[in-house]
Image: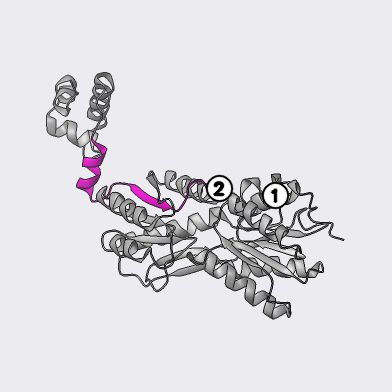
């Protein structure tokens, strides 16, 4: 049988009201009574109803987070950074995976809203199809978008400058003599894919380089990188450089190039985006764009806490500058 607050009060020799004040953290109780009630609760194995207590206080000390694909190494890194910061304030994280599906994303949003989280941090699946889910979310709880955002939707956002990041890779390989470039990325559904593609086009134009190189758009997964590498090889002519939309694509692409005895960087330069943990472990180690996970997490929670405290604040959009990390997939190019 579950231990009740009445049982704790009887063992401690106090009233139920006094036991309740102690167990809910009230300051209007003497140190002696606090010690007696706490000791009785420990001896009896009493567990308070944290959810009920939190709701009475008007908050649950929980933040919901939804990512498009937990299998993509970039997203766990962001999740870990967010959770570390929540722990410092005594809050918990409820994490959901939308599985790259706007319908699932919508159901996850409503599930977290039903659990009365104090706020939501969301990486939207789609720049357009996630709009409905975001509208539902913002009608119930404060939200902040991180990494990606929904087009024409008024909500706080923090992420890296995707266009700047891709332009850094293009400028880097161009400085090494690359003139023809292919882009291997995801279809232009998410804001990240859209902005990285736009950054690629703008950088080529700014540098006066040909715009007629291959644009292979699939998913942000390693499997697509392998398929895209096969397509490039089957075309019979490799470009000087391959700009990948993320590191996972680059990992798959590098593996397929190596299997076909294409040397990187001697035969072709390859770059990624994100700087996931495995980027420096690839063969060769991958030149990529580093996303500052800790800074993104810190800014997202700062925005969310401000929104929780005052719902009618002006919408803020924070674009963080990424940095280029040069490794052997471009170094040593002859």
**Does residue 309 show up?**
no
Quadrant where the image shows the N terminus:
top left
Which percent across, then down, holds residue 172? Answer: 74, 66
Of the image marks 1 and 2, the number of the one nearer the N terminus:
2
Which sits in the foreground, 150 or 144? 150
Q: What numbered label is drawn on residue 73?
A: 2
Which percent across, then down, holds residue 41? Answer: 25, 24
Residue 243 lies within the magenta run: no
Residue at left 74%, top 46%?
Answer: 259
Which percent across, then down, holds residue 264? Answer: 78, 54
Mark 2 burial class by Cα count in 10 Å: few <14, some 14-19, many 20+ = some
Q: Secondary structure at mark 1?
A: helix
Mark 1 burial class by Cα count in 10 Å: few <14, some 14-19, many 20+ = many
Q: Residue furthest right?
A: 334
Q: Which residue is mark 1?
A: 256
Compared across the picture, whether 210 is left or right of 322 comes to right
**Does residue 174 show up?**
yes
- From which residue to which does the magenta span run? 49-72
Quadrant where the image shows the C terminus:
bottom right
Compared across the picture, whether 193 is left or right of 13 comes to right
Which percent across, then down, holds residue 44? Answer: 24, 20
| Above or below 323: residue 73 | above
C-alpha distance separating marks 1 and 2: 20 Å
Which sits in the foreground, 232 or 77? 232
Compared across the picture, whether 91 is left or right of 230 comes to left
Q: Secondary structure at mark 2?
A: loop
| Above or below 77: residue 136 | below
Q: In the image, which is nearer the foreground, mark 1 or mark 2?
A: 1
The image quadrant of residue 157 is bottom left
Scheme of image coloration: one colour
Which sits in the foreground, 202 or 181? 181
Q: What numbered label is drawn on residue 113?
A: none
């Amino acid at each position: 049988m579950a231990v009740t607050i009445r049982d704790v009060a009887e063992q401690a020799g106090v009233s139920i009201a006094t036991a309740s004040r102690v167990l809910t953290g009230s300051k209007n109780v003497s140190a002696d009574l606090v010690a007696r009630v706490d000791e009785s609760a420990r001896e009896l194995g009493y567990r308070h109803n944290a959810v009920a207590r939190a709701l009475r206080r008007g908050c649950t000390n929980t933040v919901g987070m939804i990512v498009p694909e937990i299998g993509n190494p970039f997203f766990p890194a962001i999740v870990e950074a967010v959770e570390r910061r929540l722990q410092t304030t005594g809050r918990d994280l409820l994490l959901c995976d939308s599985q790259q599906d706007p319908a699932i994303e919508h159901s996850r949003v409503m599930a977290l809203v039903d659990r009365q989280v104090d706020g939501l941090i969301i990486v939207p699946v789609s720049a357009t199809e996630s709009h409905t889910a975001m509208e539902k979310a913002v009608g119930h709880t404060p939200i902040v978008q991180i990494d990606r955002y929904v087009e024409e939707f008024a909500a706080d956002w923090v992420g890296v400058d995707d266009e700047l990041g891709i332009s850094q890779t293009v400028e880097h390989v161009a400085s090494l003599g690359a003139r023809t470039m292919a882009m291997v990325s995801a279809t232009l559904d998410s804001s990240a894919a859209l902005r990285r593609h736009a950054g690629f086009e703008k950088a080529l134009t700014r540098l006066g380089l040909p715009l007629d190189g291959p644009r292979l758009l699939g998913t942000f997964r390693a499997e697509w990188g392998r398929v895209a590498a096969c397509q490039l090889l089957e075309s019979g002519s490799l470009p000087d450089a391959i700009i990948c939309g993320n590191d996972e694509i680059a990992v798959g692409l590098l593996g397929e190039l190596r299997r076909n005895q294409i040397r990187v960087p001697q035969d072709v330069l390859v770059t990624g985006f994100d700087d996931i943990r495995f980027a420096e472990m690839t063969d060769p180690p991958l030149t990529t764009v580093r996303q500052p996970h800790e800074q993104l997490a810190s800014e997202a929670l700062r925005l969310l806490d401000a929104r929780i405290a005052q719902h009618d604040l002006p919408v803020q959009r924070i674009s963080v500058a990424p940095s280029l990390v040069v490794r052997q997939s471009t170094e040593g190019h002859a």
